[in-house]
Amino acid sequence: MKMPRPTTLLSALTFVAVLLICKVTFSIVLGYRDYFPPIFKADFLVGREAYFFGPYEWAFYTHIVSGPITLALGLVLISERFRRRFPKWHRSLGKSQILLVALVLSPSGFWMALYARMGEVAASGFAVLSLVTAGCALLGWRSAVRRRFVEHRQWMWRCFLLLCSAIVVRVIGGFATVFAPEAMWIYPCAAWTSWLVPLVGYELYRFANRPPKKAIAMDARHFASAAPA
Ligand code: HEM
C-alpha cells in the first residue's frame, strides 16, 4: 500500500483544522441570540445577573465581538499564499489583529477570567492564557518592526494557536457533555490544556523540524560576510 506523502497529509490536516475552526466559530456566533439582549436563563449567563451589568458587561460584549474577528483574521494572516499575493493587506490586517488581541480580546478575557465558573484553577488558566496571548501578539509586532520575519512568524503562530483555545475548549466541552456529563474537573482542566497542549505541540514540531546545525552555521557565516564593516 502506498503511504500518503507528508505534504499531502499536512494539507489534509490543515483543511480539517480550518473546517473545524469555521464550524465551531459559526456555532459560537449563532449562540449570540442569547446575549443580545442578555437572557439569564441561557447556559453561559445563568447566575451572572448579580454582577453582569457594569464592567463585566463591557468586557463580555467587547470580548464576544472581537473573538470571532480575531479568529477569522488569524486564519487569513497565517496563510502564506495570502501574504505573498497581498503583502500590503497582510501588513494592515496584521496591525489591526495585534491591536485587537492585545488591547481588546486579551484584557476583556482577563476580566472575565476573574468571574470564571468552577473555581480558581479555571480562572487562573484563562487569566494566564490572556496574558500569554497578549504577550505573543506584542512580541510578534516587535519582531515585525525589527524585520525579524522568521521570529515574527513564530510569535504569530503561537498567538493564533492560543486564540484557537476558544475552539479547543468547546470541542472538549462537547465531548464531556456526551461522555462524562458529571465530571466537574473537565472544565478547569480544559482551561489549561486547551492552550498548553497546542502550544507544546507547536514547540515540539518546531524542534523536530529545526534546520541542521551545519545550515545554521553556514547562514551565520553568510550574514557575517554580507554585513557592512
Ligand atoms: C486570549 C484568548 C482568550 C481568553 C483569555 C478568553 C477568555 C474567556 C473567558 C475567561 C471567558 C469566560 C469563561 C467563564 O466564565 O467560564 C470567555 C468566554 C467567551 N469567549 Fe473567550 N477567551 C479568549 C479567546 C476567545 C476567542 C478567540 C473567541 C472567539 C470565538 C472567544 C469567545 C468567547 C465567547 C463567545 C465567550 C462567552 C461564552 C460562550 O458563549 O461560550 N474567546 N472567554
Image (cartoon, helix red, strand yellow):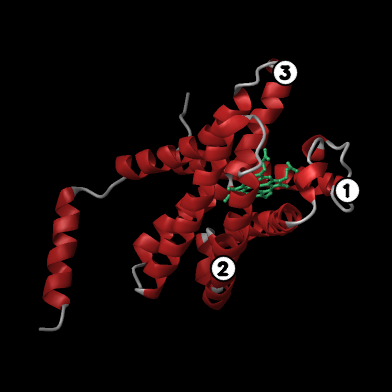
> Residue 136: in sight, yes or no?
yes
Q: Earlier in the sequence, mark 2 or mark 1?
A: 1
Q: Is residue 64 left or right of residue 172?
A: right
Residue nearest the viewer, comparing 158 with 20: 158
Q: Secondary structure at mark 3?
A: loop
Q: Residues within 10 Å of mark 2 (few under 14, many from 20)?
A: some
How far is disc 3 from disc 1 in space, using C-alphas?
A: 25 Å
Q: Secondary structure at mark 1?
A: helix
Residue lying at 38% horizontally and 41% vertically, measured from the top left: 205
Q: Is residue 111 left or right of residue 61?
A: left
- Which disc number belongs to residue 99? 2
Confirm or reject: label 3 Cβ below 8 Å from ligand 1.
no
Where is residue 120 shown, x and y percent of the image?
Answer: 56, 33
How far is disc 2 from disc 1 in space, using C-alphas?
A: 27 Å
Residue 86, image quadrant: bottom right
Residue 47, image quadrant: top right
Label 2 sits on what residue type?
Answer: Leu
Are circles 2 and 1 on residues that touch, CB within 8 Å? Answer: no
- Which disc number belongs to residue 181? 3
Where is residue 154 shown, x and y percent of the image?
Answer: 40, 55
Q: Earlier in the sequence, mark 3 or mark 2?
A: 2
Residue lying at 42% horizontally and 43% vertically, measured from the top left: 202
- Furthest residue toward bottom: 229
* Residue of label 1: 33
Q: Residues within 10 Å of mark 3 (few under 14, many from 20)?
A: few
How far is disc 3 from disc 2 in space, using C-alphas?
A: 38 Å
